[in-house]
Amino acid sequence: MRFGGPLFDSCPGPGSWLSALQREGYTAAYCPLDADAPDDIVRAYARAAERANVVIAEVGTWSNPLSQNEEERREAVAKCQQGLALAEAIGARCCVNVSGSRGEQWHGPHPENLTEETFDLIVESVRAIIDAVKPSRTFYTLETMPWMYPDSADSYLRLLRAVDRRQFGVHFDPVNLICSPQRYSNSGAVIREFCAALGPHIRSCHAKDIALSGRLTVHLDEVRPGTGGLDYAAFLRELNRLDPDTPLMMEHLQSREEYALAAAYIRSAAASVGARPL
């Protein structure tokens, strides 16, 4: 597996970008460019990553393709198409977004999110994004989420079959699947089930952790890797069985120091289960 996270250094060009990755010991990177980057700059970063054996994990296109505001929905679909085109051009493993919400919060809960009607809308939007770009080497993926599809291995399998596009892949964030005390207490089983069902389709993964508190009714909080209850041993064992270029990308921490602590924990946990060095 590959390992990476956000960078805090100024990186005005491919050389400084690679130097920053090397200082952190990262072998995977978030896409360093926006979708409007000139073609020659995109090619320069793609060549630099290939020469340095760095995997560009993902292009994020965070938006709401299911918005009930038609203008917002169209803009989101266009953003995803542009992001997928960038992922194809720069050689990223995937373009990633959430499926979208029927509510005002673009990535938030809504009573209509987990309905068959919304499932069909997701299929329609994913097809529209992939069919407009027609990628051949990258994939469009949906991040697993607790309150919208895909919210389980089963719902992701359903989506893969329903979308029926070769370049539709899987983005795995196990913390986002831990949405109940039952899943929290059995996170290893959740991870193993997901990877058994979808492993060959996984293009990129997020590294976080989650903690269950004693406040009623149920409170689950995202925390730094190593400070929560996610079964990292199971997570890293399963990732170690996948394509060796599968990226594991840290996110959502607030400082370089927090990322250093998270990276140290993940590297130690990987070594303890015999995973490839990160």
Image: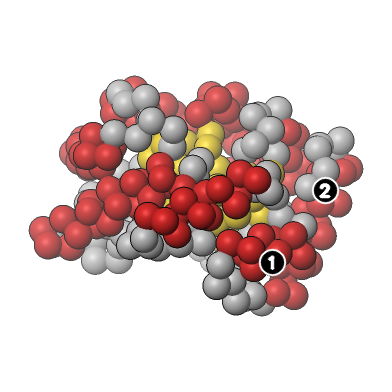
Q: CA distance from mark 2 to mark 1?
A: 24 Å
Tell me the number on the disc at residue 33: none
Instruction: Give the image's coloring scheme.
Output: secondary structure
> x, y percentage for residue 147?
39, 51
Q: Quadrant of residue 128?
A: top left
* Residue at image location 64% in from the left, 75% down from the top: 9
Number of labels in the image equals 2
Residue type at tag 1: Ala
> x, y percentage for residue 244?
69, 33
Q: Is residue 240 above or below residue 221?
A: above
Residue found farthest to the left: 70
**Disc 1 marks which residue?**
20
For marks 2 and 1, the one nearer the N-term is 1
Image position of 86 (left or right of 278): left
Tell me the number on the disc at residue 269: 2
Label 2: few (<14), some or many (≥20) within 10 Å?
Answer: some
Q: Secondary structure at mark 1?
A: helix
> x, y percentage for residue 247?
62, 44
Q: Is residue 92 visible?
A: yes
* Residue at image location 56% in from the left, 48% down from the top: 47
* Residue at image location 73% in from the left, 33% down from the top: 240
Q: Is residue 17 above or below residue 270?
A: below
Q: Nearer the viewer, residue 5 or 207?
A: 5
Q: Secondary structure at mark 2?
A: helix
